[in-house]
């Protein structure tokens, strides 16, 4: 009988491969079968399951482990990739009916290349909304991805398939991207850890002015190990900070929080959480204080991020859609088309002002972090909401109106993570967001690991 590898950590896989107690081929076969089960249970979670390649990579890893030439702790460990990042030869359709189904990626994105070099076994592409445009995961091509804690609720987005895979224990870690909360929000809705590192730490290709590449995982330690690998230079990303960071993330875990200055902002940028969310976040913040941190309730005073966010979120879509034939454009999610049409009305002066205001926002947060080491907030204003909506009840179909807790820190480029901090009476997970000044990823991870260690 095949072992059940649900919830295994990277360290457990590494030890099992080293001792011969399990093999990468056995694990890959199990993960491929489980991937299909997830699609049956939760809607489309993976849009492509890479049977042939996964087994090929697993066999190569198994040979290395037997020969004593394994490439490191990640060799043979399964991983999934968001259907936004290039994996050479895979059907990169961005979950859109406008992309020819025969289209294949002809490159490996930088983070994908680093994971391939480390010997990880690629299980498949995870679902995202069309062109990753919103913070729930559904698309005209694949339908909705359901929350594993309540099948009538969203998994969040845009890395929703990755978050479901993490919650279901398909693999220790899943590669996502985050331009407005797309790692942190689905991770919070599904009850797992997710982190976007400081902008530019993990190279992206194609690169954008908001996108952070990072992991969704069941444990902070596993996320940190993967960040060690993907947080390396790549010349294809002009934004990338060209520094080698061997062990920079995993080695920071275990640091005590004694004396750490933490600001707590339950209200932020006009956002206020539901009472049941705030109650759980309050308890988690008290645990940080119990661990020795100096916690003060303090809200950063920043410019209104909403219009800045709207202009930056939508700008990248204009060129793509302008080039589409009318018949092709008619196959796009109508709400996305509406978003693009509004974006096309922005003037050059609107864009210039948005850049100025973004700079001001970044400076305001940098000034705030002169007095604090970390900032904690709720990750979201509410738990996962019902399927079929793009926003919680009471909010317009506009992510800028309800997700400032997350996207403000994309605009400002800060590292930010979400850590599970309990569940509502209805069994829906809630996340605590931990944010640091730019390049303080180690402090964010260390605080996340300590909160995880004592439990929610």
Image (cartoon, helix red, strand yellow):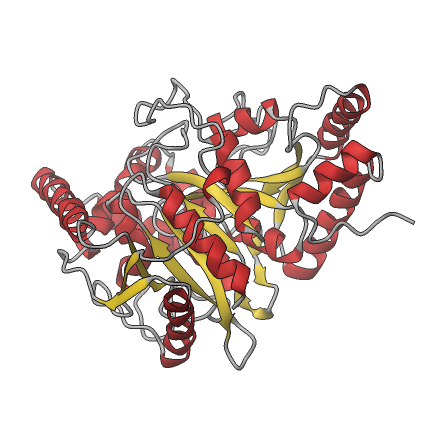
The x and y percentages for residue 255 are 44, 49
Q: Using residue 368 as the reference point, say whether residue 257 is left or right of it.
A: right
The answer to whether residue 60 shows anywhere in this view is yes
At horizontal 40% and vertical 28% (from top left) the residue drawn is: 203
Name which quarter of the figure residue 283 lies in: bottom left
> Relative to 241, does residue 134 appear above or below in the rendering?
below
Residue 234, placed above or below residue 320: above
Horizontal and vertical percent for residue 146? 58, 62
Residue nearer the viewer, 185 or 104: 185
Asked if residue 11 lies left or right of residue 207, the reply is: right
| Residue 156 placement (x, y as % from top left) | 47, 59
Q: Could you tell whether 371 is left or right of 209 in the image?
A: left
Residue 87 lies, with reference to residue 303, above or below; the image says above
Q: Residue furthest right?
A: 1
Q: What residue is at 38 percent from the left and 62 percent from the top? A: 379
- In the foreground, 26 or 286: 286
x, y percent for residue 412: 24, 45
Q: Is residue 331 visible?
A: no
Residue displayed at 17% across by 49% down: 370
| Left or right of 27, for residue 173 | left
Towards the viewer: 181 or 340:
181
User: To which quarter of the image does residue 164 belong?
Assistant: bottom right
């Amino acid at each position: 009988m095949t072992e059940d590898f649900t919830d295994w950590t990277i360290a457990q896989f590494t030890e099992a491969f080293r001792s011969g107690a399990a093999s990468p081929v056995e694990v890959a076969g199990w993960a491929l079968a489980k991937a299909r089960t997830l699609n049956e249970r939760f809607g489309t979670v993976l849009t492509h399951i890479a049977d042939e390649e996964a087994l090929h990579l697993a066999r190569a890893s198994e040979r290395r482990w037997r020969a004593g030439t394994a490439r490191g702790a990640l060799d043979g460990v399964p991983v999934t990739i968001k259907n936004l990042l290039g994996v050479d030869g895979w059907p990169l359709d961005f979950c859109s009916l406008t992309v020819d189904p025969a289209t294949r990626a002809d490159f490996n994105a930088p983070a994908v290349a680093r994971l391939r070099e480390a010997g990880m076994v690629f299980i498949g592409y995870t679902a995202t909304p069309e062109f990753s445009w919103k913070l729930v995961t559904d698309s005209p091509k694949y339908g909705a991805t359901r929350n594993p804690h309540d099948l009538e609720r969203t998994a969040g987005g845009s890395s929703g398939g990755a978050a479901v895979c993490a919650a279901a224990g398909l693999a220790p870690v899943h590669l996502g991207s985050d331009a407005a909360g797309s790692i942190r929000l689905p991770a919070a809705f599904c009850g797992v850890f997710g982190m976007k590192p400081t902008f530019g730490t993990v190279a992206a290709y194609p690169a954008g002015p908001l996108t952070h590449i990072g992991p969704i995982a069941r444990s902070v330690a596993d996320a940190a190990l993967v960040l060690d690998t993907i947080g390396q230079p790549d010349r294809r990303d002009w934004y990338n900070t060209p520094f080698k960071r061997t062990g920079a993330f995993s080695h920071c875990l275990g640091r005590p929080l004694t004396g750490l200055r933490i600001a707590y902002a339950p209200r932020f940028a006009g956002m206020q959480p539901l009472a049941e969310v705030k109650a759980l976040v309050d308890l988690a913040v008290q645990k940080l204080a119990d661990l020795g941190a100096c916690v003060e309730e303090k809200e950063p005073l920043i410019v209104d991020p909403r219009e800045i966010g709207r202009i930056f979120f939508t700008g990248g879509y204009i060129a793509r859609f302008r080039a589409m034939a009318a018949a092709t454009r008619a196959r796009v999610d109508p709400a996305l088309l509406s978003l693009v049409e509004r974006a096309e009305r922005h003037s050059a002066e609107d864009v210039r002002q948005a850049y100025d205001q973004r700079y001001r926002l970044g400076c305001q947060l940098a000034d705030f972090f002169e007095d604090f080491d970390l900032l904690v907030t709720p990750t979201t204003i509410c738990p996962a909401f019902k399927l079929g909506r793009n926003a919680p009840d009471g909010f317009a179909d506009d992510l800028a109106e309800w997700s400032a807790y997350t996207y403000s820190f994309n605009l400002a480029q800060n590292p930010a993570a979400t850590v599970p901090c309990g569940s509502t009476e209805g069994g829906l997970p809630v996340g605590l967001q931990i944010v640091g000044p730019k390049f303080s990823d180690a402090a964010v991870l260390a605080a996340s690991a300590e909160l995880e260690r004592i439990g929610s």
